[in-house]
């Protein structure tokens, strides 16, 4: 601290004041306080109210309603729809349908065989067995057809995302100007909750498969574009120079050097795109995606945990299989990645043979007799839990009691407190936080985003959502840092945690709602719980890695000076891991927000509920305003917690 | 090597002809070479006045056919920029540059590609290999770019792979090779396109000392076998002295001295060069031709014979073995002798004493030093694996064309003021 170094003599006070101003953070705060002292009395005199002043809102419901009505009226007649969106929509429907029919025609045996063989060739025998088991489990759970529906939608969406992402990535990778223009957009898109993407596409395409696919593409393409651009830009300059020195043309440089050098990033991009596409394809059930997500959605709507679980397990299996197979393909790169064409041919022949056998023996659809219905036993178990664990357990209370206490003791006071705060003070707090951790630019963005929420007229529900986010983030960080520190200090803990984290990080957001509903019923507390569970793995992982990455020489020198392990942690590891910890906070906030919003489906209320309500009632205006508020909230939260360095990739 | 005399007498055109070449980095770089006032500024002044850095500062030299031309300097001296300017991997700011008389700076894209594909190939410090390709495909890469058919380029590449001693590793990937092996692949890739000139950009700096010596031997062997012109960039003075027919010593983008290793070591152009070559084991660079004196009739008849191109260190060995002055024999004729005094004078860096008084003044210090210096020198020489005799062997006829060593022009007997006589620091660092 500069204050500590200032000489304290008879002019000590003045020096201290000067030193205080010189200190960056203090200077920023002082400046902010000055600005506030001038502006606040004025604002207060003009619009004195706790909540956002009504005079400052713009009611968008009417114009948005009109736009939506116009679109619905003109969807079948206006040339823009007839010749542009109409074609897109038809193409999407046709291709999803085609893929779906192919999958059905291959039969369960054929699909399983093809999937297993692809896994075998790219990732080895163990993953092939795992893949086959996963697909068979989907069938056993009686979810074959919904799985195929989801898969068909995924295939189309992933292909489109990869094509779009690669094109954007190529443009950004090869041109500095495109990169500068595209990067902030892609960065921002990655922090927005999935729900925010749903309404604009619904506005244009209506509820249905085309909207679901396009929302998925918009959500899943950015990581591909980002990583393609990163990979192309990160090509080893030495290699590129050597290639140029041999007289390669620009085309040869791209095809023989730059693209192959970026293979790792390209495959990582593919992996992330697939995972995000799956996550979105499931959420998009809200706008008519059908398939597994729809089953979960319907089941959750009637609090039928058993049915939700039966559809949720295939989602998790699909996620794990897709993640492991693409991940393994990325890791096998260094070795003989080319693959043996003959082995591929054999694999193809076997797959076709299995598919034909399935056809001939008339086993296309998964036989009903083989299905295991887990919904009822699960529901019985849940009923038992409701009876015995919900409340009244001696001494520890019950899960519903916990949820209730959490709501009344933490969520309610937090929400009421936020809503009680004068609106300008909220803006001030946002500005101060964002400026302290970032630059004046991030502070400005954050304040403007927060103000936009007020202008949109959704101040109150947004603060409700914010209160849930804050509570969830606090819990996540306390747990995450504790577990992260434990894992960083003990190899054994880390070894135990790793597989758990791996699985949890691959699961789509939607799935987390199922167990919390079983445990806590519906309401805001379950939404917060789901958010905590969803964000925890990323926070733990980043914390552990950050602490582990601390320069061993610094630790060694601390040890050689006789520091206790507590001192090492406090004085060396934590300060040096500060960037990683800040990143963990940022990630935690972004991930928590995504799930808190989805929590609208299980009684989380606030913005998420507005979106669902808007979709369910066809009241697009309400939904769109809420969607815009979600975007602003996401932007604000990201900027407030964003250290100067952008994070490299989304944790989920 | 210092013994390989450039064949400029054959009247061939220089391979590379560089004159008044500039490369300035920074805003509005082109005004710096154009303005004599700016051009005369020191690097620090130039930076503060214009924000520019002159990486290559008004450089002129010719690279003769078949020679190993070494550009040497510390990091930041502009040597790597200079070699990249030769094939316009970095675009020079101004000046003239010709290859075989053809203006390189006037070439269009296609012609320049042609130059890079067929006439000049480069070996890089960090290898620059394609990690996703096998060794064989890496070596064949230059041919692939030229559009050579798969079978033909593979056959060619296989031959080159054998030539650089990597047989059996064709199917490995660069990541599975050691640093030395990777650089052999880099060398093979450059050789595969059969270029007129090989450009080396600090190729061995990233290698361990022993591997480095192996690779230097490899380059010497290749040069002896093929006689290919080479431009070799290094920051290692010993490497420069080992490999170079001529050495250009760079500092702050300028060439401060250009000459044979013997000239650089024997008569440094300024204090910078003097300081630079201070620790060089002179007895391994200087030849007996420089150190000898006229023989008396008696001396011309006996004593061990050495060639004029032999190093002082070799002569020391001969003299120490027999105990009498060595005769310098050129084509069966005795052209002079070297005795203890002469040889020790070279080792001590005190110049060649001409009278007894000087000899007396030097002798105690020199004698003391010689005892320490000769032993490591002999070891050093042994490690060179006797390349020198073989190397000077094939072209005895060329030795006659050697220019009179600059050393002779110095006032004899005046000890170098800048060179401390003290102690045994003359060993290889």
Image (cartoon, rainbow, N blue to C red):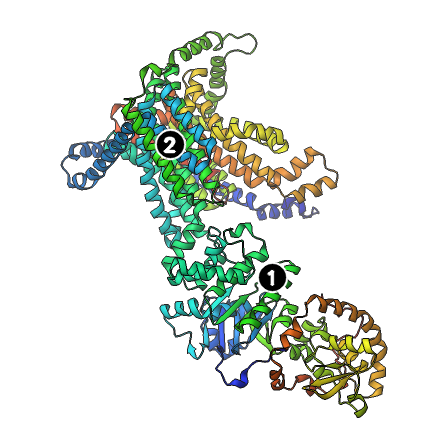
Q: Which residue is mark 1?
A: B205
Circles 2 and 1, Cβ within 8 Å, touching? The answer is: no
In the displayed orientation, state which residue is furthest to the left: A77
Locate residue B8, reporting x and y percent: 54, 83
With respect to residue A10, does A350 lie above or below?
A: above
Residue B184 image-quadrant placement: bottom right
Q: Going by the image, does A440 lie left or right of A568?
A: left
| Secondary structure at numbered mark 2 | helix
With respect to residue A566, does B96 lie above or below?
A: below
Task: Judge whether residue B346 can be spotted in this image.
Answer: yes
In the displayed orientation, state which residue is furthest to the bottom: B297
Q: Which residue is mark 2?
A: A115
- Residue at x-position 39% and y-position 67%: B113
Point out the image quarter for the N terminus of chain B: bottom right
Q: Going by the image, does B288 lie left or right of A100?
A: right
Q: In the rendered structure, the residue with mark 2 lies on which chain? A: A
Q: Nearer the viewer, residue A188 or A256?
A: A256
- Residue at x-position 56% and y-position 35%: A543
- Residue at x-position 71% and y-position 77%: B311
With respect to residue B136, does B33 lie above or below?
A: below
Q: Nearer the viewer, residue B3 or B80?
A: B3
Mark linked to residue A627: none
Residue B367 image-quadrant placement: bottom right
Locate residue B168, reporting x and y percent: 54, 54
Q: Going by the image, does B277 lie left or right of A387?
A: right
């Amino acid at each position: 601290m500069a204050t500590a170094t200032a000489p304290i003599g008879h002019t000590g006070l003045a020096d201290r004041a000067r030193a205080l101003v010189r200190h960056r953070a203090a200077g920023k705060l002082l400046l902010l306080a000055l600005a506030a002292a001038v502006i606040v009395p004025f604002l207060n005199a003009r619009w004195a109210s706790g909540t956002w002043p009504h005079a400052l809102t713009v009611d968008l419901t009417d114009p948005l309603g009109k736009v939506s009505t116009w679109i619905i009226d003109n969807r079948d007649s206006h040339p823009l729809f007839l010749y542009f969106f109409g074609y897109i929509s038809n193409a999407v429907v046709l291709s999803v349908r085609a893929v779906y029919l192919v999958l059905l025609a291959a039969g369960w045996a054929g699909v399983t065989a093809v999937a297993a063989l692809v896994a075998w060739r790219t990732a080895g025998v163990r993953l092939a067995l795992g893949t086959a088991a996963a697909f068979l489990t989907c069938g056993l759970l009686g979810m074959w057809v919904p799985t195929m529906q989801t898969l068909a939608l995924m295939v189309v969406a992933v292909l489109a995302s990869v094509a779009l992402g690669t094109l954007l990535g190529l443009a950004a990778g090869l041109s500095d100007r495109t990169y500068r223009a595209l990067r902030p957009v892609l960065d921002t898109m990655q922090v927005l909750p999935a729900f925010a993407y749903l309404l604009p596409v619904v506005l244009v395409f209506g509820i249905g498969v085309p909207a679901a696919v396009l929302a998925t593409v918009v959500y899943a393409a950015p990581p591909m574009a980002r990583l393609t651009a990163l990979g192309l830009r990160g090509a080893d300059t030495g290699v590129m120079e050597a290639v140029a020195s041999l007289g390669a043309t620009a085309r040869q440089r791209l095809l023989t050097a730059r693209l192959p050098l970026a293979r790792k990033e390209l495959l990582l991009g593919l992996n992330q795109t697939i995972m995000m596409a799956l996550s979105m394809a499931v959420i998009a059930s809200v706008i008519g995606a059908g398939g597994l997500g729809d089953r979960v959605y319907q089941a959750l709507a009637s609090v039928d945990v058993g049915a939700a679980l039966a559809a949720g397990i295939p989602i998790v299996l699909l996620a794990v299989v897709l993640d492991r197979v693409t991940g393994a393909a990325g890791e096998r790169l260094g070795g003989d990645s080319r693959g043996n064409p003959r082995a591929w041919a054999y694999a193809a022949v076997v797959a076709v043979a299995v598919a034909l056998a399935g056809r001939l023996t008339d086993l296309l659809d998964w036989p009903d007799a083989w299905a295991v219905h887990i919904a009822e036993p699960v529901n019985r178990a849940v009923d038992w839990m409701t009876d015995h664990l919900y409340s009244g357990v001696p001494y520890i209370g019950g899960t519903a009691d916990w949820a209730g206490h959490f709501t009344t003791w933490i969520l309610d006071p937090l929400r009421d407190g936020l809503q009680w705060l004068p609106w300008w003070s909220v803006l001030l707090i946002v500005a101060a936080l964002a400026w302290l951790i970032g630059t004046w630019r991030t502070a400005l963005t954050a304040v403007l985003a927060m103000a936009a929420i007020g202008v949109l007229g959704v101040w109150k529900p947004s603060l409700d959502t914010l209160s849930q986010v804050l509570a969830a983030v606090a819990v996540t960080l306390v747990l995450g840092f504790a577990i992260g520190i434990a894992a960083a200090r003990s190899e054994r803990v880390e070894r135990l945690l790793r597989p758990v984290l791996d699985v949890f990080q691959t699961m789509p957001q939607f799935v987390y709602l199922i167990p919390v509903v079983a445990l806590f019923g519906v309401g805001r507390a379950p939404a917060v719980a789901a958010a905590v569970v969803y964000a925890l793995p990323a926070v733990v992982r980043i914390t552990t890695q950050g602490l582990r990455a601390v320069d061993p020489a610094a630790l060694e020198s601390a040890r050689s000076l006789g520091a206790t392990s507590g001192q090492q942690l406090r004085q060396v590891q934590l300060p040096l891991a500060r960037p990683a910890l800040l990143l963990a906070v940022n990630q935690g906030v972004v991930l928590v927000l995504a799930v808190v919003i989805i929590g609208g489906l299980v009684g989380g209320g606030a913005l998420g509920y507005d979106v669902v309500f808007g979709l369910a009632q066809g009241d697009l205006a309400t939904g769109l305003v809420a969607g815009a508020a979600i975007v602003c909230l996401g932007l604000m939260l990201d900027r407030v917690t964003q250290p100067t360095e952008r994070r490299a990739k989304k944790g989920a | 090597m210092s013994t390989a005399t450039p064949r400029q007498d054959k009247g061939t055109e220089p391979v590379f002809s560089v004159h008044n070449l500039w490369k300035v980095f920074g805003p509005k770089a082109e005004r710096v070479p154009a303005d004599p006032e700016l051009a005369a500024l020191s690097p620090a002044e130039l930076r503060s006045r214009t924000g520019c850095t002159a990486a290559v500062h008004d450089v002129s030299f010719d690279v003769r056919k078949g020679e190993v031309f070494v550009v040497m300097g510390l990091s930041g001296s502009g040597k790597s920029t200079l070699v990249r300017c030769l094939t316009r991997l970095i675009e020079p700011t101004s000046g003239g540059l010709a290859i075989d008389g053809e203006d390189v700076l006037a070439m269009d894209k296609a012609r320049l590609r042609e130059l890079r594909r067929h006439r000049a190939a480069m070996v890089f410090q960090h290898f620059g290999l394609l990690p996703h390709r096998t060794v064989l495909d890496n070596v064949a890469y230059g041919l692939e770019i030229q559009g050579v058919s798969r079978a033909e380029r593979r056959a060619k590449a296989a031959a080159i792979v054998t030539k650089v001693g990597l047989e059996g590793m064709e199917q490995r990937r660069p990541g599975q090779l050691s640093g030395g092996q990777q650089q052999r692949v880099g060398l093979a890739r450059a050789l595969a396109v059969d270029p007129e000139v090989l450009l080396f950009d600090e190729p061995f700096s990233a290698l361990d000392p022993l591997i480095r010596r192996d690779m230097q031997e490899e380059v010497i062997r290749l040069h002896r076998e093929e006689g290919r012109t080479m431009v070799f960039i290094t920051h290692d003075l010993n490497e420069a002295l080992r490999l170079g027919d001529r050495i250009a010593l760079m500092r702050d983008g300028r060439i401060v001295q250009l000459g044979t290793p013997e000239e650089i070591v024997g008569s440094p152009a300024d204090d910078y060069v003097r300081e630079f070559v201070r620790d060089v084991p002179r007895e391994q660079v200087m030849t007996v031709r420089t150190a000898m004196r006229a023989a008396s009739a008696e001396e011309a008849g006996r004593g061990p014979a050495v060639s004029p191109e032999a190093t002082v260190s070799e002569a020391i060995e001969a003299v120490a073995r027999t105990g009498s002055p060595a005769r310098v024999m050129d084509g069966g004729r005795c052209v002079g002798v070297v005795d203890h005094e002469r040889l020790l004078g070279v080792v001590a860096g005190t110049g060649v004493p001409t009278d007894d008084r000087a000899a007396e003044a030097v002798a105690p210090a020199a004698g003391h030093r010689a005892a320490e210096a000769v032993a490591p020198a002999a070891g050093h020489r042994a490690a060179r694996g006797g390349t020198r005799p073989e190397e000077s062997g094939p072209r005895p006829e060329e030795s006659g064309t050697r220019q009179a060593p600059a050393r002779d022009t110095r006032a004899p007997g005046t000890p170098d003021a800048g060179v401390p006589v003290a102690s045994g620091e003359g060993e290889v660092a």
